[in-house]
Image: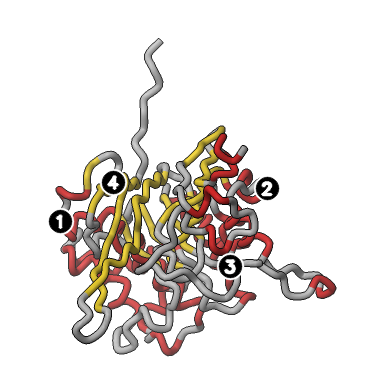
Amino acid sequence: MKDAEIIAPALETDNVSCVFNVSQGFMKGTKPLRAINGVSLQVPKGEVVGLVGESGCGKSTLANVLLGLQAPTTGDVRYSGTSAAGFSRKDVARRIQPIFQDPYSSLNPTKTIRSIVSQPLRIHNVGDPSEWDAKVDEMLDIVGLPSRSANNYPSQMSGGQRQRVAIARALIMRPEIVICDEPTSALDVSVQSQILNLLQDLKDELGLTYLLISHNLAVVEHLADRVAVMYLGRIVEEGPADKVFANPRHPYTKALLESVLTPDPKLGVPETHLGAVFPNPIDPPSGCSFHPRCVACMDICKSKAPRPISSEGHMAECHLMEGDAQ
């Protein structure tokens, strides 16, 4: 019997770092800001990987690198096993597309919906121009909008309808991978579930692969197959969604989960025990970057960075998982 064929991940990063030189002020020179610090992440074909973390942890920078909008300082990005270094900007755009969080600002208010959705076809000269209108009507139908809405302007549509337009624009060229950057955060709660269900249906119908970036852990739990937790430019925990939510291994992940509001008013506002100050990425702490905010901090955490420890496909970078913790 032949060995099972190894299928390369749809999207993969290999030790990717992204460093910016930030001015310290007049006559003070610059210092490096490591927005991404050695991130290795795999997004298997046909799955949803959720990427979570506080604002400023590097999620958006990583998304820009994956979209080809920002070149990594070191490391490699691969699409289906092929290095992105050999792809042009247009080649990348045909493979991977974004859905942004704010449908109010991501759509040109002076263009009709037909013009907005067909724009990628025009830019990339995909197919026969005589078929573009039909493709737009088909995609609008797929995302749950009537064909008559093609002649409307964004201002004539609700927030949920605008996000459907943004989804239609992202999918019009039938990409393999979609990066969903907070796709429901700007929407009313009553509309969020509709958009999430639509994204799930589209994934199954069109065979899509998603990287879902979100602060909302409930959204990630609803959609994701796997979860990656990012802190100060590093993936500090990654694994199957059910395992990460049921048994988080990193203190930061535990704090994030404990901070989720519950429907029970008796429980009040949850306490994260993380403090109000986010660490400075220009001057990161020694040892484990999370140790100044960690309730389980040990002496070793202050001087030695933890290594990633994996068990049954569930990884965490924490000394609590090492023999050093004994």
Foreground mark, 2 or 4?
2
Q: Are marks 3 and 2 in contact (CB under 8 Å)?
A: no
**Looking at the image, which residue is at 52% across and 51% down?**
301
Q: Which residue is mark 2?
A: 246
Looking at the image, tell me whether mark 2 or mark 4 is earlier in sequence order.
Answer: 4
| 276 horizontally vs 34: left or right | right
Q: Residue type at mark 2?
A: Ala
Residue 88's label in the rendered image is 1
Q: Residue type at mark 3?
A: Gln
Q: CA distance from mark 2 to mark 4?
A: 31 Å
| 287 horizontally vs 171: left or right | right
Q: CA distance from mark 2 to mark 1?
A: 41 Å
Compared with residue 72, is residue 106 higher up or lower down, i.e. above or below? below
Q: Which residue is mark 4?
A: 79
Confirm whether residue 168 shows in the render: no
**Looking at the image, which residue is at 51% across and 67% down?**
54
Compared with residue 264, is residue 241 higher up or lower down, i.e. above or below? above
Q: Which residue is mark 3?
A: 194
Compared with residue 129, is residue 224 higher up or lower down, i.e. above or below? above
Q: Residue type at mark 4?
A: Tyr
